[in-house]
Image (cartoon, grey):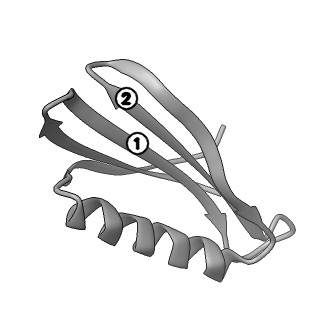
């Protein structure tokens, strides 16, 4: 399953905040499911590194990504990069 990466960034009083969302969502095949990892960095240093969503329902993974994207944008983040990478 390919890994979709989205990077969000905003300037804040605390420094430059970056959120990296890596979503591995498979809708077909033997390994159906979703795993989403989120890394929050401030000024290049990792603040948190979590897996806030994991499960057998790919639709729930897609919904989580959409809701998280909307939340980031509403908090003043802007999308600075989006890419799809094959899983190793």
Q: Position of residue 14 (x, y in %)?
A: 21, 28
Q: Residue furthest bottom?
A: 59
Marking on residue 20: 1
**SS at badge 1:** strand
- The quadrant in which residue 23 appears is bottom right
Marking on residue 41: 2
- Callout 1 touching callout 2 (CB < 8 Å): yes
Query: Would you place residue 56 above or below residue 79 in this image?
Result: below
Q: Residue at x 75, y 68 (%)?
A: 33
Query: Which class describes the residues within 10 Å of circle 2: few (<14), some (14-19), or many (20+)?
Result: some
Q: Residue furthest front?
A: 13
Q: Residue furthest right?
A: 30
| Quadrant of the rendering where the C terminus is positioned | top right
| Quadrant of the rendering where the N terminus is positioned | bottom right
- Which of the two labelled residues, at mark 1 and mark 2, occupies the earlier sequence position? 1
Q: Position of residue 75 (x, y in %)?
A: 23, 59
**SS at badge 2:** strand
Q: Position of residue 21 (x, y in %)?
A: 45, 49
């Amino acid at each position: 399953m390919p890994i979709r990466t989205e990077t969000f960034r905003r300037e804040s009083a605390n420094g430059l905040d970056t959120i990296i969302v890596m979503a591995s969502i498979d809708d077909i095949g033997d390994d159906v499911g979703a795993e989403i990892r989120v890394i929050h960095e401030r000024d290049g240093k990792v603040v948190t590194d979590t897996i806030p969503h994991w499960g057998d329902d790919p639709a729930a993974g897609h919904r989580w990504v959409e809701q998280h994207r909307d939340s980031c944008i509403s908090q003043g983040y802007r999308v600075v990069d989006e890419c799809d990478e094959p899983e190793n």
